[in-house]
Amino acid sequence: MDAHIEQNELEILGALPLALVVFEQDGRAVWLSEQARRLLGSCDDFASALDTFTSDTRFDDWHSVLAEVFESDRPSHFPHINCHDPVGTARIMEVTVCRLRSETGRGQAIAILEDSTALAALDQKLAHSERLAALGKFSAELAHELNNPLDGILRYVNLAIRLCENLEDKRPTEYLVQARGGLMRMIRIITELLEFSRTSDAALVEDRIDHLIDEALNSLEHRAGESGVSFRRRFSTNLPFIRSGNLCQVFSNIIRNAIEAMGKSGKLSVTAEIAGDDVRITFADEGHGFGAGGAEQAFAPFFTTKPAGQGTGLGLAICREVIEKYRGTISGGNRLKGGAIITITIPLSSCQTAADLYLPRPGMLSENS
C-alpha cells in the first residue's frame, strides 16, 4: 500500500464503526475517523493526544512507543489501557497499531482504538460470580464439618445444666443457658445454609409455579392454624412451569416470616399472575410490617428484627440469591393498611420451554381461601 492513503480508501475506513487514526512516523495525525474524534477530540499530534488520553503509568511516553512500531514488522497490540475521554469518563481501551508499508521509505501507520470497558466490567462480574460460587461451596462444606462438633458441645452443655440445677449458686446454670442460646443460634444458621446448599434431583424437576406455592403453603398450614393465621390464594390460570430448584424453600421462608409477624391472628394473601413478560408473586400479610428503612435492610445478610436468638437474619438474603439465579427480583414494602408485602418477579424467559403449551395469556385470577 502506498504511504499516502487515497481519499476513497479513507472514505471506506470512515464508514467503519471503529475509532481509527492514520499517523506519520513522527506521531503527527494524518486522518481520524469520527469515532476517534469523539474519543480524542481534534488533534494534530496523535502521540501527544494518547499521552493526554491515557492515565496508565505503563504508557507515559507514546512518542517512544509509536516509534518502536515503525521498527517492527508485526502489528503491536496494547491491551487493557486505563484512559479517560475528553469529558473525564474512565474507560478501558485496547490499542492495535499496524505499520503501512511504502516503496519510498516514508511510512504511515494505522491505529485501532477499541473500547473494552463493558467487556472488562463483565469479566469482573464473572470473576466475582466465580468467587461467590467457590465461597458457597466452601460454606456448605464448612457447615457440614461444624454440624457434628456443635451437636456434641450442645449435648455436654445440656448435661452440665442438669448437674448445676441443684447448686445453691445459680450463676453456672445462667452462664450455661446463655452458652446454649448461642449454640442454638449457630445451629440455626448452619441449618439454613445446609437447607439452601443441598442439591438433589428435585432441583431438576419442572413444576407449575402455583403448585410450588401450594406445596409451601400446605407444609405450613398446621403452624398457621395454631397461630390463628389463614391463607388466601389468588392464582392466574395456566401459570408456567419452572425448574423448581430451591423455590419452594424461598416461598416457605417468606410464609414462615409472615406467620411469625402476625402473631396470634391475621390473613396472608398470596397472588401469582402474569405481569407483562414476568410472573409476579406477592405475599401480603397483616403483621407489623417493615420498620423505617427496613424493607431494603431485610435482605441484607444477618439483619433481623426478631429478638436475640430467635432469628438468623439469613432467610431473606438467601431468598434473594435464589431468585436472582432465575434472573428475577425480590423486594419488600409496607402495606397502606398495615403489614408487609414481599414481591417476587421471575421472567417468563426463565421458565421452562418444555411448558410452552402452558404459557398463560393474561386473564382472570382464580381465588380461593
Image (cartoon, helix red, strand yellow):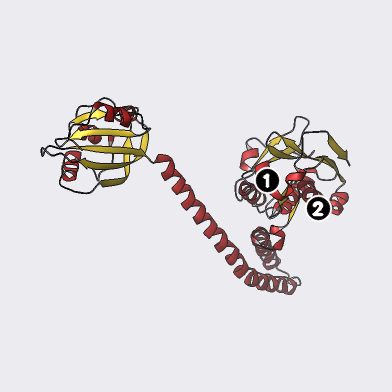
Please tell me in which quadrant of the rendered image residue 120 appears: top left
Left/right placement of residue 103 relative to residue 144 reads left
Residue bearing the label numbered 1? 305
Task: Answer whether labels 2 and 1 touch (C-beta < 8 Å).
Answer: no
How crowded pointer 1 is (Cα within 10 Å; few <14, some 14-19, many 20+) is rated as: some
SS state under label 1: loop
Location of residue 196 with respect to 272 vertically, above or below: below
Q: Earlier in the sequence, mark 2 or mark 1?
A: 2
Q: On the picture, is 353 further left or further right than 89?
A: right
Q: Nearer the viewer, residue 36 or 329?
A: 36
- Return the mark for residue 215: 2
Instruction: Name which residue lies at 72% across and 39% down.
Output: 280
Identity, as a three-letter code, of the amino acid under mark 1: Thr
* Quadrant of image for the N terminus: top left
The answer to whether one can see residue 335 in this image is yes
- Residue name at image x 23 percent, y 36 percent: 51
Q: Give the residue at x 30% y 29%.
A: 33
Q: Nearer the viewer, residue 344 or 239?
A: 239
Residue lying at 83% horizontally and 33% vertically, measured from the top left? 364
**To which quarter of the image does residue 328 belong?**
top right
Mark nearest the camera among 2 and 1 is 2
Q: Position of residue 236 (x, y in %)?
A: 80, 39
- How far from the left and from the top, in percent, is residue 299? 63, 45
Q: In the depicted view, which residue is nearer to us: 324 or 195?
A: 324
Residue type beneath disc 2:
Glu
Q: Position of residue 68 (x, y in %)?
A: 16, 45
Residue 114 spot, x, y in % from top left: 35, 39
